[in-house]
């Protein structure tokens, strides 16, 4: 496993965790730099403090050394015990006095000898094995006839202890600060992302049911306002897709109901107890095959139209159809010739419309089915051509459309009277108008026609 994959697996999965990790890493780097700089400055300060202490001691010892005569003399004072501690006095390079606790061959004495031989102010540190480091500084004394050197020593243990204490304290402070940074960052990021999580949950819930609820851009920060606008646009598209899906499902159910009914009726008739002749069986098979083919055509037409409209809403379905034969076939396929007489009238024998035959059938069939359903005795389907268009009228002599319902006539799922005893879901007329408009045509109702109802279809000429 590569290092990149390991790091990717160890990385937090949530945005809050990643931002908290970035903040923690940044704070750790910054605190590391500050801690190193602080401890370096403090170590340097303690180093200078030790040197100042040694110089002060050397100055105090220098007052007891007399270099005015031909020989260097060490004067006796009341503080000799204090001054003799960690002090070496040289006449030239000859050792006159040394601390009682040291020997001539000890590392401290040897270092003091070297500093005295240097004959210039100097300092050095001795790290004796198993002991605390010791700082030594020399101070030359120049007389008229003789020269002397005072070397003082200082145990650096207390200074190192102070430096270590400062380092430990700074590390503890860094750890506390990093923990607080991580916790505060998680809380701050969590609070900042809480509205986003709420909006996400609401968008998921609204998209599942096609709700009209929207986020809007009011009373939101700029970032959340942009997110809300994007989610609103997405919810609008989802709602449109759901509405189209529901519409397509309803239209398929509405259009497939008639051929399915024919198949069920033929099967019920054929399965009755009386044996059927070969001719009757063949006729039943032909009716079922014709109804099945009709169902296939309906599905292909509606699905193709929906697919084409989804990919290119402004497109029109190609094709050319001779209108009169299609109308004749639709009228002849009606099962109510014994109750209602339907006829087709046309000014010319050949009248072409710029739509495919299956689409023309799906546009006219709902109008013709409604006319036959409500007609008392007759239905007339007429077709004529005008420049650039083909007009088809479907007229019946029934009760007509109630004036109060005329405004909702083409609304999906609306019926003038749901208890009129007629089967229907209120989807036929909306489907006819939608399909006609998809190819640049129109389906409308003539409110001035009386008695009965008149529906007008306008399609582009072929």
Image (cartoon, helix red, strand yellow):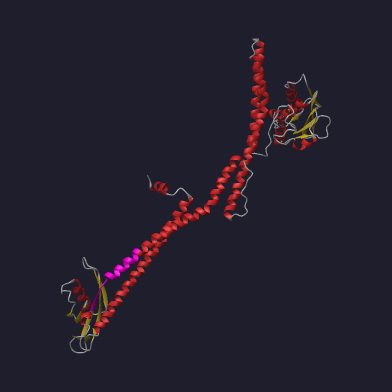
At a point 63% along the width and 45% down the height, the residue shown is 213
Q: Quarter-wise, where is residue 250 in the image? A: top right
In the figure, 284 relative to 120: above or below?
Answer: above
Q: Where is residue 93 in the image (x, y as percent from the top left)?
A: 18, 80
Specify whether 331 is left or right of 229. right
Quadrant of the drawing holding the N terminus: top left
Quadrant of the drawing holding the C terminus: top right
Q: Position of residue 182 (x, y in %)?
A: 44, 56
Q: Position of residue 362 (x, y in %)?
A: 70, 29
Q: Position of residue 435 (x, y in %)?
A: 70, 34
Specify whether 460 is left or right of 24. right
Q: Quarter-wise, where is residue 173 in the image? A: bottom left
Specify whether 254 is left or right of 175. right
Residue 151 at least partly seen: yes
Give the magenta range. 151-168
Specify whether 91 is left or right of 458. left
Residue 95 at least partly seen: no
At a point 37% along the width and 61% down the height, the residue shown is 172
At a point 67% along the width and 19% down the height, the residue shown is 265
């Amino acid at each position: 496993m590569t290092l990149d994959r390991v790091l990717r697996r160890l990385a937090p999965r949530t945005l809050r965790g990643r931002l908290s990790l970035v903040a923690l890493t940044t704070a750790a780097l910054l605190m590391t730099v500050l801690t190193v700089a602080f401890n370096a400055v403090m170590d340097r300060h303690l180093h200078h403090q030790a040197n100042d202490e040694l110089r002060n001691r050397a100055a105090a010892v220098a007052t007891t050394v007399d270099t005015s005569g031909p020989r260097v003399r060490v004067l006796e004072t009341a503080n000799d015990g204090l001054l003799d501690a960690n002090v070496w006095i040289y006449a030239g390079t000859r050792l006159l006095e040394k601390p009682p606790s040291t020997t001539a061959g000890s590392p401290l004495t040897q270092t003091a000898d070297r500093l005295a031989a240097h004959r210039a102010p100097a300092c050095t540190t001795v790290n004796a094995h198993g002991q605390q480091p010791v700082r030594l500084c020399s101070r030359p004394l120049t007389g008229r006839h003789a020269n002397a050197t005072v070397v003082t020593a200082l145990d650096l243990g207390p200074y190192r202890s102070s430096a270590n204490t400062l380092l430990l304290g700074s590390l503890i402070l860094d750890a506390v600060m990093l923990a607080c940074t991580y916790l505060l960052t998680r809380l701050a990021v969590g609070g900042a992302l809480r509205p986003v999580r709420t909006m996400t949950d609401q968008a998921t819930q609204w998209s599942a049911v096609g709700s009209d609820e929207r986020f809007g851009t009011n009373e939101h920060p700029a970032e959340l306002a942009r997110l809300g606008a994007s989610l609103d646009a997405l919810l609008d598209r989802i709602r449109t897709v759901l509405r189209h899906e529901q519409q397509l499902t309803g239209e398929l159910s509405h259009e497939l109901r008639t051929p399915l009914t024919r198949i069920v009726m033929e099967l019920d008739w054929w399965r009755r107890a009386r044996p059927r002749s070969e001719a009757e069986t063949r006729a039943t098979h032909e009716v079922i095959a014709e109804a099945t083919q009709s169902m296939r055509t309906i599905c292909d037409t509606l699905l193709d139209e929906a697919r084409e409209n989804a990919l290119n809403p402004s497109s029109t379905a190609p094709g050319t159809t001779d209108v009169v034969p299609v109308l004749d076939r639709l009228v002849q396929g009606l099962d109510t010739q014994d109750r209602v007489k339907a006829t087709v009238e046309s000014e010319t024998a050949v009248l072409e419309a710029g739509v495919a035959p299956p689409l023309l059938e799906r546009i006219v069939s709902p109008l013709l089915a409604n006319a036959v359903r409500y007609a008392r005795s007759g239905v007339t389907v007429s077709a004529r051509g005008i420049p650039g268009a083909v007009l088809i009228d479907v007229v019946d002599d029934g009760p007509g459309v109630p004036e109060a319902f005329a405004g909702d006539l083409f609304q999906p799922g609306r019926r003038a009277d749901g208890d009129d005893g007629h089967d229907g879901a209120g989807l036929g007329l909306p489907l006819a108008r939608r399909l006609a408009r998809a190819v640049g045509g129109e389906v409308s109702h003539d409110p001035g026609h009386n008695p009965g109802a008149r529906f007008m279809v306008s399609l582009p000429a072929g």
